[in-house]
Image (tube, rainbow, N blue to C red):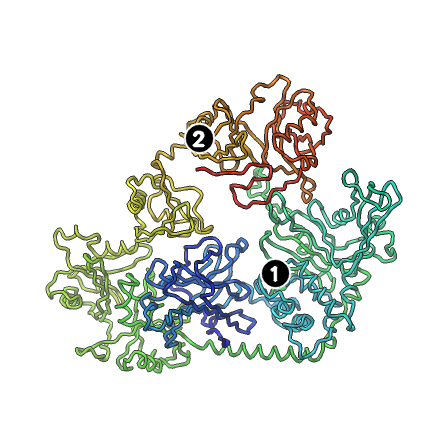
Amino acid sequence: MTLMTPPPLDQQQQQQQPDDDEMLVPHTDFPEGPQPMEVAQAETANTVDTQAVDDPPSARFTWTIENFSRLNNKKLYSDTFFVGGYKWRILIFPKGNNVDHLSMYLDVADSATLPYGWSRYAQFSLSVINQIHNKYSIRKETQHQFNARESDWGFTSFMPLGELYDPGRGYLVNDTCIVEADVAVRRVVDYWSHDSKKETGYVGLKNQGATCYMNSLLQTLYHIPYFRKAVYHMPTTENDMPSGSIPLALQSLFYKLQYSDTSVATKELTKSFGWDTYDSFMQHDVQELNRVLCEKLEDKMKGTVVEGTIQQLFEGHHMNYIECINVDYKSTRKESFYDLQLDVKGCRDVYASFDKYVEVERLEGDNKYHAEQYGLQDARKGVLFIDFPPVLQLQLKRFEYDFMRDTMVKINDRYEFPLQLDLDRENGKYLSPDADRSVRNLYTLHSVLVHSGGVHGGHYYAFIRPTLSDQWFKFDDERVTKEDVKRALEEQYGGEEELPPTNPGFNNSPFKFTKYSNAYMLVYIRESDKDKIICNVDEKDIAEHLRIRLKKEQEEKEQKRKEKAEAHLYTIIKVARNEDLLEQIGRDIYFDLVDHEKVHSFRIQKQMPFNVFKEEVAKEFGIPVQFQRFWFWAKRQNHTYRPNRPLTPQEEVQSVGQLREVSNKANNAELKLFLEVELGQDLKPVPPPEKTKEDILLFFKLYEPLKEMLQYVGRLFVKGSGKPVEILAKLNEMAGFSPDEEIEIYEEIKFEPNIMCERIDKKATFRASQLEDGDIICFQKSAQVGSSDQCRYPDVPSFLEYVHNRQVVRFRSLEKPKEDEFCLELSKNHNYDDVVERVAQHLGLEDPSKIRLTSHNCYSQQPKPQPIKYRGVEHLSDMLVHYNQSSDILYYEVLDIPLPELQGLKTLKVAFHHATKDEVVIHTIRLPKQSTVGDVINDLKTKVELSDPNAELRLLEVFYHKIYKIFPLSEKIENINDQYWTLRAEEIPEEEKNLDPHDRLIHVYHFMKDTAQNQQVQNFGEPFFLVIHEGETLAEVKVRIQKKLQVPDEEFSKWKFAFLSLGRPEYLQDSDIVSNRFQRRDVYGAWEQYLGLEHTDNAPKRSYAANQNRHTFEKPVKIYN
């Protein structure tokens, strides 16, 4: 496919800034994340033609959709395409988004997974290509700041479906539709004025959207001059392509960082090592990127003058050892490292991490070491350093896997690092016996790489002091700034920040919040090597072919920039005509006169004199120049948009560009005009009549109450001193009424935020009625006595009110919250009863009070957690609003009892654990709010299968795998909360009913120790009660537990048993008397003391809620509502 250069979007300045009259809306029908589409992907072809311009990233995406008229989808997404490093896709509604137009939007394809607070700005156009005459292709442009609330933007009424599906028009050929998107992504920054080179002597790197952590790493490597020099000395040839050669791509990047005046792009480099997609960066981390780069460079340096540079700079060695305690046996293994991973969790600073790194682990008990010749032995295991590299790279483990939550988490704990790091401290405690003690391991901090944000995203930047002077610099993508040492060090330690108390006079505790910006990588340079490493690098280090190539690149870039600047010497002129008003009013629009998105537009050079432009219009519309009169449009203070005044003869000799500036204070790149053409008796154009100050141009709309129809019938000049009575006959003629028909006339004044439409006194002058050029008069036949009963909207104001407030609501069943089930046209002014009545009527339900509605959360694209209470809102408009967002979705349920009655009841979800069968059944219990737990149990008995008809039940509160409470039968259910913890019902075992005075009922929980969380105890699985008898040993209790849980012998033999008090385990031996441990009765809650069963949790991780607490030795869950 040929390379397409998108039209010059950006220089049309604010051209696409939506006027209030443009149909630009975010599409609100959005589920979270991409939806599966019911269309075979093979039916659509997608191509992207990317402009070879670094700035701005822009591209054209072409989507060919086959079998278009046979698509059954309400909506359809294109494949994802990349522009500016971001993922986009087109969304279309082939049959319209509740309108009789094709609806089309640009959508951020990965909006559901982007980090909190994301936003991106794009200028774009969407087009439907005319495959017969390209010049009739329909193209609409706009711009938008995309964010979580508005992750798509576009045109609900893009083009009439009638035109699209008409085979003669050329938009559907062989049932194939071609859609195009031109997208230019802009960085929304307020610091374009900041000249990094001028302010600091350094330049930044462009953010390609996906390259998150790469820029800070590249800046760090670039500012190690010895490394940069080695990269320059790698042999490359003029025939190499940077995108296929890592050495050349890195040389090119470093050269530009050294000699360019503006920020540098990284695209060639990412291509050269194969990470040219967004996913590549998502699947790796900074450490992997560092290793990939260094390994590949090391490989490319082999056999060259710079062979071994990477090792010389970054490679250190440590020794892993295992040493037996009771016999003379030691095993050692030397390993190299390019960077060290240091623990942050549980360490206050870098030294504490090194202490932990070399900590000695004892191998004993079950964990003895198998030494050759000596069998199983107690041993010590550890790591010591043989040597450290000149450039020491420390990766701080800020991201860890949380086993409890089954997810990655970010550690934001405070963690300090020094300006000078002494690794010889305490008599060389980190060094192995083989280490060369003559080398002084004193290091100076060179760079601090920072991550700001959470685990699923955020921002990366670096603090670097390139010459190890006291002056630090912050490298934040394109922007480089000078910073002091406090910003680079202390502010990147993490931890909590304390805000000063808002009211110092009172004893209120200061407000603390976690600092989400903190260091994740440190680079130190050894003092004794710094002169060698911070060396001088100049032009003579750079190969001549590289200098020539890069100079040429700069010249080409300048040429492109110049071409782009000239391409923006155009203006779009939109010309509205009488024909547009006739076509649109009463169909697409009801208020004002025209939708400018649907009128003819011309792309004209700004220097063209307006008179020459008129000749273009004559060619296009067949209206000779002398019969054309153009009017400027003006936005009035009441937000209406009307023709304001004709162009003067002096203005007509000006250039198009000058006129645009006259007409438009908003600096919008468009010029909007109304073309007035007067027709003579023979309906041929005649010269326009002279317009004096006395003449007023009025537009007329006719309303027919029986048909509920509004239409445009024409325009007239009237005299300011004239009166409406003088033109009644003319209005009747325009409407096709008899000359003496009685008519009522109204002025349409405004429609936002409320309708204002007032009756005009037929006998007062037009001037007295304050009418002016561009005003709209609506008229209708005078109402006959009694006829108004036959009409829903008997007069113009009531009809306009109806149109303004009508709202098509998409109803979805709460059980299927992603699918629209039916649509109803309602009024925003409908009250609660009106809405449920209409829904009941649609569903064929006699009792509307059995309908319960739930509002839509526009941000999560889900139903709100709480339904709407009976008569809990005034109007439909209140049901559809969510904070400042408005939606058109409501969810409904059909209840088995009326809602007012249900609101007097309490609903609880209770999990019933069967005494003998291996299952859990979840029941929904609904009882009056004043009921007790005893009532719940009685109700449950009628629904569950008991092991014995006389079995007694109890209700427990279980939270995080512990039993917190046995509910007394007399407790009221109104305050029981089953949303956060589980309510569990079970039969009371016989042995618990007849407790001996010396028997104890104890809690038994499963637990394991989390290696990542400092051996913290973590509970899992189903907790239970157990009776222990006086004098009973652990061995006897174990037999009963194994039988109860039905655990196989082999697995049970690995289990350990402990008495836990306040989370600390004391391990028990088989001979221990268990009851001796459970003597205290003054504990706050029984869960503070329990018998713990320590074993691994072998259960597969479940992501869905019903089974979130399932484990292998638990019972399968069924859900009954």
Seen from the viewer's position, the closer of residues 745 and 986 is 986
Of marks 2 and 1, which one's residue comes earlier in the chain?
1
Residue 663 seen in this snapshot: no
| Mark carried by residue 943 | 2
Residue 699 seen in this snapshot: yes
Left/right of residue 26 with respect to residue 1098 in the rendered view: left
Residue 749 position within the rendered picture, expressed as x and y whole percent measured from the top left: 27, 60
Instruction: Specify the amino acid type for callout 1.
Output: Phe
At 35% from the left edge and 33% from the top edge, which residue is drawn?
A: 901
| Mark carried by residue 281 | 1
Estimate how packed mark 1 is, as few (under 14), some (14 to 19) or many (20 or more) residues with alpha carbons within 10 Å.
Answer: some
Residue 744 position within the rendered picture, expressed as x and y whole percent measured from the top left: 17, 59
In the image, residue 1049 sits, relative to residue 370, either above or below, namely above
Say what secondary structure mark 2 lies in.
loop
Say what secondary structure mark 1 lies in.
helix
Q: Quadrant of the C terminus?
A: top left
Instruction: Specify the amino acid type for callout 2.
Output: Lys
